[in-house]
Image: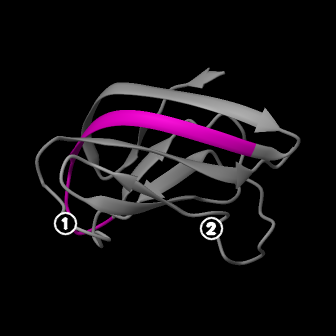
Amino acid sequence: GTWTPVINSNVDALTAAEGYYTKIGRMVYVSFHVNVDPTSTGTAIGLAGLPYTVSDLVQNSGIEGTSAIFSDSALFLVFPLSGGTTFAIELDRPMQGSASASAAAYRGSFFYPAAT
């Protein structure tokens, strides 16, 4: 199916947002592409709109999976946040390269357990 990433936090502008998903049992695989103009490079980008609520299987962690995604010039950690439909892109700690305060394209995919 399809889903649309939307602004949650640390984003001035979001354009060209698109997402796709496949759900098998409780596991959800999502892929996405967004053009994001971040408010700051000192904190994570927060996006919402995941197609299913993220489960809270790992109690008190707040995170139910991780993956690497990329922008035009860097790699970033992405993770879904339990109990909602949001995910974070660790803009403040790139895995490789550097974060940009200018608009950039971010794309990638990850798995997460659905609450139902």
Quarter of the image with the C terminus in it = top right
Q: Which mark is residue 63?
A: 2
Residue 51, given in percent of the width and then of the height, sits at: 66, 33
Q: Residue at x 62, y 67 (%)?
A: 63
- Alpha carbon separation for disc pair 1 and 2: 24 Å
Choose mark 1 or mark 2, whichever is in front: 1
Residue 86, given in percent of the width and then of the height, sits at: 55, 48
Amino acid beneath label 2: Ile
* Above or below for 98 versus 83: below
Amino acid beneath label 1: Gly
SS label for mark 2? loop
Pointer 1 residue? 97
User: Within 10 angstroms of label 2, few (less than 14), some, or many (20 or more) residues?
Assistant: many
Q: Residue at x 65, y 51 (%)?
A: 111
Q: Which mark is residue 10?
A: none
Magenta stretch bounds: 28-43
* Above or below for 108 versus 2: below
SS label for mark 1? loop
In this rendering, the count of numbered labels is 2
Residue 34, given in percent of the width and then of the height, sits at: 34, 34
Residue furthest to the bottom in view is: 60
Q: Residue at x 12, y 54 (%)?
A: 101
Q: Residue at x 52, y 52 (%)?
A: 87
